[in-house]
Image (cartoon, grey):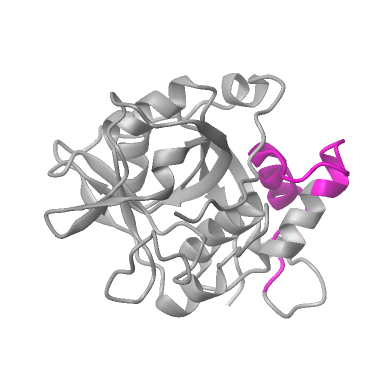
Amino acid sequence: MTVRPLGRLVPPDDNHIRSYPMRRLAAPPDVCERTLSLSSRHRRFYDQGATSMCVGYSSSQERSLSERITFDPIWLYRQCKNRDSIPNEDGTFLRVAYDVLREQGARKAGAAGPDPRYGVERNEWATSVDDIRHAIAEGRAVVMGTNWYRRMFTPERRNGLYWLPDGGGDLGRLSGGHAYILNRVSDRYEAFATPNSWGPSDRDWHPDESGWPVSMIPFSLIERLLAEDGECVLVVDRKETQT
């Protein structure tokens, strides 16, 4: 089993969640089945390797799903470290990443600096599985910031898919905090899916048809992780990008 570095830190308070909760503008569909595709080229770019930069990588993945452009996750992580008040500690806070994206924008891969057109106008925080189901069904990827346990490093194969454990069982020892996107909802499987950001070199995370590791995450596990100081951010209003 490969134990990867983890880098999502638990914020000192939940003011951001209480101040900007997710607003539902329409009733969710009765059945949620949707996958938001991220191209294999973009996915290959977002391999954090043996770093603790998951907040930068997952937040940049979310921007790529919206803009269809590759962004610089290392730049975003470093901007977070410039403002998170713990510059000598590995990892950072998910809410700081979205402060950066609102105030500075995102930096395209290879660009000299950030472009505010690729930032966000407003982000909100989901607090339940139903919120997340609704968001992805509407076409909005979400970024999770949660605890990560030992058994979550080794998805198990069931019915042709790879799965993280159910939320009601033993997850093993707490390993730290991780940030990752959810880009699929399936009521049929009662699960979400994550392409993660560890890359195809991690043999415990098995590749899909594009060669990138993807695993299903049961609704029950997400419900448990949200209750354990978990966070879930989604973009409500994106900047208007000129063409």
- Position of the C terminus, as image quadrant, is bottom right
The image shows residue 53 at horizontal and vertical percentages of 67, 54
Question: Looking at this view, is 241 or 166 the one in front?
Answer: 166
Left or right: where does residue 30 sit relative to residue 42?
left
Rendering coords of residue 119 (x, y %): 66, 56
Relative to 12, is 84 above or below?
A: below
Magenta span has 26? no
Looking at the rendered structure, the number of numbered marks drawn on it comes to 0
Residue 28, by quadrant, is: top left
Q: Looking at this rendering, what residue extends furthest in the front direction?
A: 1
Quarter-wise, where is residue 170 in the image? top left
Closer-to-camera residue (201/41): 201
Asked if one can make out residue 225 in the rendered structure from this viewpoint, the answer is yes
Q: Nearer the viewer, residue 210 or 133?
A: 210
| Residue 42 position (above or below residue 223) | below
User: Residue 193 appears at what percent x and percent y?
Assistant: 32, 51
* Residue 141 visible, this angle: no
Point 36% across, 37% down: residue: 132
Residue bounds of the magenta highlight: 81-108
Give the quarter of the figure containing the N terminus.
bottom left
Kindly identify the residue that appears in the image at 38 percent across and 64 percent down: 213
Left/right of residue 200 with respect to residue 75 in the rendered view: left
**Where does residue 66 sit, x and y in percent of width and height?**
48, 61
Task: Examine the image and state in which quarter residue 130 appears.
Answer: top left
**Is residue 86 part of the magenta span, yes or no?**
yes
- Residue at 49% x, 22% y: name it: 228
